[in-house]
Amino acid sequence: MMVFMFDVLVYLYENYWRPDACPDHDQLQRKLTAVGFETEEISEALKWLDGLARGSQSAEAPVAADSMRVYSEVELDVLGVDSIGFIAFLESAGVLPPPMREMVVDRALAVGNGPVDLDDLKVIVLMVFWSLGEEPDALILDELFVAPEERVVH
C-alpha cells in the first residue's frame, strides 16, 4: 500500500513546483482521482504531506554544525542500513543540513514499517526539498531521481 503512496508523491513533485502551487486537499484529491490514483493511496499521501508541512515549519531550528546524529533502535529498524548510509552521504556532500535530515528521518518513520526502501527514501528527500521550496544541486538531483523504468507513475 505505501508503495503507491510514493507514486502519488512523485506525481506531485513532477507536476507542482512547490507545495503552495498545489490546490486545496479536496480539489487535489479530485485531480489525483481523475489521474487514476486510488482513494486510499491519495489519503495516505495527503496525510503524509500534512506531517511534512508541520515538519517544514520547524526546519529552522538551529543545530550545531559539529553535532553527531545517533539513531535510536526504532530509527535503525525503520530506516535500515542503506537509507542511513544514503543520509550520511547527503550530509557529507553538504546538501542535507541537520534540520532537513531530521525532517527526512521523521517522514521515513511516518511510513511505518522498515527498512525503508532506498528508492522510497530518495522520494522522501525530494519531498523535503520540495516542501521547503528548495531544489538540490544538479548532481544530487540526478542521484535522487529514481529511474523511470523502476517507478511507474499513473
Image: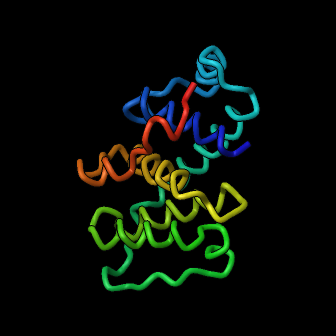
Q: Residue furthest front?
A: 149
Q: Residue at x 51, y 52 (%)?
A: 119
Q: Quadrant of residue 35?
A: top right
Q: Position of residue 114 (x, y in %)?
A: 68, 63
Q: Is residue 152 left or right of residue 16?
A: right
Compare residues 58 and 71 and report the one nearer the observer: 71
What residue is at 66 percent from the left and 25 percent from the top? 37
Residue 66 vs residue 154, the one in the foreground:
154
Q: Residue at x 61, y 22 (%)?
A: 32
Residue 25: x percent and y percent?
A: 62, 28
Q: Position of residue 33 (x, y in %)?
A: 66, 19
Q: Would residue 42 appear left or right of 124 to someone viewing this image?
A: right
Q: Residue furthest top?
A: 34
Q: Quadrant of residue 44?
A: top right
Location of residue 40 by image quarter:
top right
Q: Is residue 89 above or below residue 132?
A: below
**Image quadrant for the C terminus?**
top right
**For the image shown, how many numbered marks are present on the structure?**
0
In the rendered view of the protein, which quadrant contains the N terminus?
top right
Q: Residue at x 59, y 59 (%)?
A: 108
